[in-house]
Amino acid sequence: MNVQLEKAKAQLIERNSKMDNKKGEIYERSSRAKYLKEKPTQWSIDYTSPYFQGDKIINIGAGDTEDKRVNVSFTPSSAGIFNTFVTFKSIDNPLDIRLVELEVNVIPAMTEYELEMTCPARMSVTQPIPIINKSGMD
């Protein structure tokens, strides 16, 4: 049980209870499902990372039983681990906010290099070769 989350929920309900009681829009969990089946819902979508882009609004129709998919495009600048939070905000119900975390691990394309060195006979050549691993993994 997340105590801070429960406390935040209680504060939101308390703040909006006067407005919601006037409209008769406080729903218990069972009647909430009925409400969503009867009324289409529209969601706005926000991304916290500039590397992720996608749908800005999704509609879920009344009585939809199929899974809804959100198209997200990802354009990494380099190899590494990229995180973003995708925030779904119900346009119809301002208290209904959902947060999804995405984590993408980008591996670099395999690249082969060939190093050719020439030198006079019976002489040595030394060439330092820097190897950089930005992924944080060996």
Image: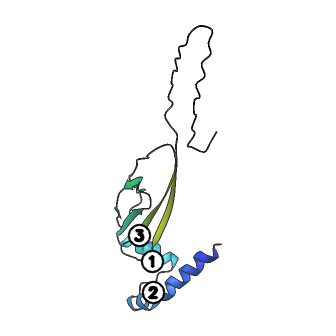
Q: Amino acid at mark 1?
A: Leu
Q: Give the side of residue 86 with respect to residue 6, left or right.
A: left
134 versus 127 height, above or below: below
Locate residue 91, reporting x and y percent.
Answer: 36, 72
For the residues labelled 2 and 1, say whether their Cβ atoms are less than 8 Å apart: yes
Between disc 1 and disc 3, whose residue precedes?
A: 3
Identify the residue under disc 1. 95
Viewer-nearest residue: 104 or 39: 104
Question: Which numbered dot is residue 134?
Answer: none
Between disc 2 and disc 1, whose residue precedes?
A: 2
Coloring basis for residues? rainbow
109 versus 20 height, above or below: above
Q: Amino acid at mark 3?
A: Lys
For the residues labelled 2 and 3, say whether their Cβ atoms are less than 8 Å apart: no
User: Quarter of the image containing the C terminus?
Assistant: top right
In three-dimensional space, the C-alpha distance between marks 2 and 1, rounded to whole angstroms, equals 9 Å
At x 44%, y 92%, the residue is: 18
Task: Answer whether residue 5 is visible to the viewer in this image.
Answer: yes
Q: Give the side of residue 11 with respect to residue 24, left or right.
A: right
User: Quarter of the image containing the N terminus?
Assistant: bottom right
Q: Tell me which corner region of the image, top left, top right, bottom left or bottom right, holds residue 42.
A: bottom left
Viewer-nearest residue: 62 or 93: 93
Identify the residue under disc 2. 16
How would you rate the neighbour count of disc 2 (Cα within 10 Å): few for under 14, some for 14-19, many for 20 or more?
few
Q: Amino acid at mark 2?
A: Asn
At x 50%, y 37%, the residue is: 108
How would you rate the neighbour count of disc 1 (Cα within 10 Å): few for under 14, some for 14-19, many for 20 or more?
few
Identify the residue under disc 3. 89
Locate residue 124, reporting x and y percent.
Answer: 62, 16
Question: Residue extending furthest top?
Answer: 121
How would you rate the neighbour count of disc 3 (Cα within 10 Å): few for under 14, some for 14-19, many for 20 or more?
some
